[in-house]
Image (cartoon, rainbow, N blue to C red):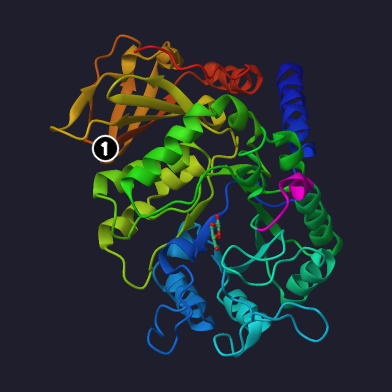
Amino acid sequence: MGSVGFSLLTITICIMSQQLVNSLDNGLALTPTMGWLHWERFMCNVDCDTDPNNCISERLYMQMADVMVKEGWREAGYEYVCIDDCWPSKQRDANGRLQADPKRFPGGISKLADYVHSKGLKLGIYADVGTSTCAGYPGSLGHYDTDAQTFADWGVDLLKFDGCYMDWTLLGEGYRNMSKALNKTGNSILYSCEWPLYEWSYKQPNYTAIREACNHWRNSADIYDSWSSVKSILDWSADHQDIIVPSAGPGGWNDPDMLVIGNFGLSHAQQESQMAMWAIMAAPLLMSNDLRDICPRSKELLQNHHIIAISQDPLGRQGYRSIKSNSLEVWERPLSRGRLALAVWNRQEIGGPQGFNPVLLPSWKICHPKCNVTQVLPSYKELGVLTPDSRVVVKVNPSGTALLTISPVESHIKKNQNMQWLNTPLKLKNAAL
Ligand code: GLA
């Protein structure tokens, strides 16, 4: 390797390790977490007598793990099977430890973890930084070390730590202490926080501190199975992008909440928008749906390896909204090797598909002198080698999103461009169309 090549590599490594030093140093979530989480779809259904198939019980997670292996989810990258609220007994055991509800989890969490691990998957669990969980089960306040050790003893691989029933001035201390407690166990336990969500009502959270303690963090309200909920999360993320986008990178991610694709509330175009935007935002891809009963189109979308490759891009830069007009938004995410992912979201909910010419975008400069463009959504299409003068029209369905990847063609451009993305400060103000 020539000396120029060597120094470029050195600088790249320095910049990347600088980023890693500032993130929670547990070696996890180097790309956004992928898996399944029960909350949005199954909530706090504890009625196993009348609804054994859908209640929060070991059977639900075992069946989900089985399907994840059989139906290609694990192969697509979905790895964590996660329990949310309502799993424990209302009382701690005689030694002050959390215990699973004995009727719904007769084998206990440790057996469930063994089962999930035997399928090549990982198990996530849920607890709360305060005196009680949001649904009224025992909280971890005063028990952080015990609970972290209990989860480690059971072989749990991820903890979602909620923020209900906690004095907001103590949130930071609580989340940091649980982070330390997990670390002390010596096990690799991915740490998913809700710290900023609970702090935003009182003050602007300190994202440097959050990134040092957590592998991902919820910022905005709980997702519902509706288009208005998905839109409000996207609006929140764009409106706060100057604050939240710079904090994302390998080891730590902003979490806009679960994917609700495959449920009841979104049209197919809206499901495509959620998938595309979650990939652009470098968001954890935690599905909350019933994988035992999901329509083939939703399954194909969730397993789309082109979109997953954008989500999991190793550069680990979160995308942002670059253009907002009355009916269209453009979001972009810098990718490794100087490439760019571009999402054009049609917010108009009347009429037919709108045409959009991406060549007009300022970021199309990466096509100088040439670039290779692939349309990933709404259908896969190789648009071929284009130049700044090419005429391209992508069609965007109402409430849908067209997703493109753009790769510069010349090899010397590729190298320089990669460095450029790493060094250029983010310009997040929305440009005019
Ligand atoms: C909060 C969280 C949700 C879910 C519920 C469980 O609302 O934000 O994601 O965990 O609690 O009670």
Q: Is residue 368 above or below residue 110?
A: above
**Mark 1 neighbour class, 10 Å CA radius: few under 14, some 14 to 19, many 20 or more:** many
Query: Where on the picture, by quarter, is residue 417?
Result: top right
Q: Is residue 307 above or below residue 177?
A: above
Q: Which residues are magenta?
A: 165-172
Residue 104 painted magenta: no
Q: Residue at x 51, y 63 (%)?
A: 37
Q: Is residue 235 above or below residue 33?
A: above
Query: Where on the picture, by quarter, is residue 155?
Result: bottom right
Extreme residue in the left direction: 351
Whether residue 24 is visible to the viewer of this picture, yes or no, is no
Quarter of the picture holding the C terminus: top left
Whether residue 364 is visible to the viewer of this picture, yes or no, is yes
Q: Residue at x 28, y 13 (%)?
A: 390
Q: Residue at x 60, y 37 (%)?
A: 316
Q: Residue at x 64, y 42 (%)?
A: 196
Give the quadrant of ligand 1.
bottom right
Residue named by callout 1: 399
Residue 167 painted magenta: yes
Percent position (x, y) of residue 386? 33, 18
